[in-house]
Image: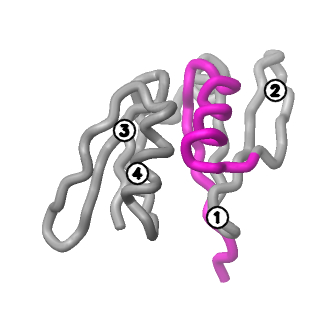
Amino acid sequence: MLKKFELMLYVDDVAMIGEFFEKALDAKIISKTRMVDDSFSLKLSLLDQVEINLYNTEFVKKYSPMVSLEMPSLMFVVDDIEETHEQVAKYAKDISTVSVQGNQKVFSFADPEGHYFAVGN
């Protein structure tokens, strides 16, 4: 039935956030689409069956005003949290230290626009 998961995120600067995901989380840009207002969207592959679609916030406000622009709370699960922390720290606007919560190690970080994400193992 289900075969893939695509998540749509709305950001102010699609190119900058796309580059951030490429560098910080090793995402791969798989397509760039010009939109009717001359903005563009990017589709990034994070895992074989997980993709993120980045759209310009102003485009969404104009063409889909009923859509919530709130950023969802996302947690990326990794094998080596210390290595991931080190990689993300090179590019993140803000990053927490790795801490233990319950039975897992976690940290959070912000992209260049200040959207926060979590990482756990």
Location of residue 97 by image quarter: top left
Screen quadrant of the N terminus: bottom right
Residue occupying image coordinates x 39% and y 32%: 110
Find disc 1 in the rendering and name its residue: 47
Residue stretch rendered in magenta on the structure: 1-28
Give the residue number, with chain letter if any, for mark 3. Answer: 109
Name the residue carrying label 4: 74
Q: CA distance from mark 2 to mark 3?
A: 29 Å
The residues bearing labels 1 and 2 have C-alpha atoms spaced at a distance of 25 Å
Q: As shown in the figure, which amino acid type bears the numbered disc 4?
A: Leu
Mark closer to the chain start, 4 or 1:
1
Q: Secondary structure at mark 3?
A: strand
* Residue drawn where x is 35% and y is 49% of the image: 118
Mark found first going from the N terminus, 3 or 4: 4
Q: Judging from the image, what secondary structure is the residue with disc 1 in? A: strand
Q: Which mark is residue 35?
A: 2
Identify the residue at horizontal 47%, vertical 42% (top origin): 88
Please tell me which of labels 1 and 3 falls first in the chain.
1
Q: Measuring 83% from the left and 22% from the top, which residue is drawn there?
A: 36
The percent coordinates of residue 39 (x first, y second) are 77, 19
Q: Earlier in the sequence, mark 2 or mark 3?
A: 2
Q: Is residue 38 left or right of residue 52?
A: right
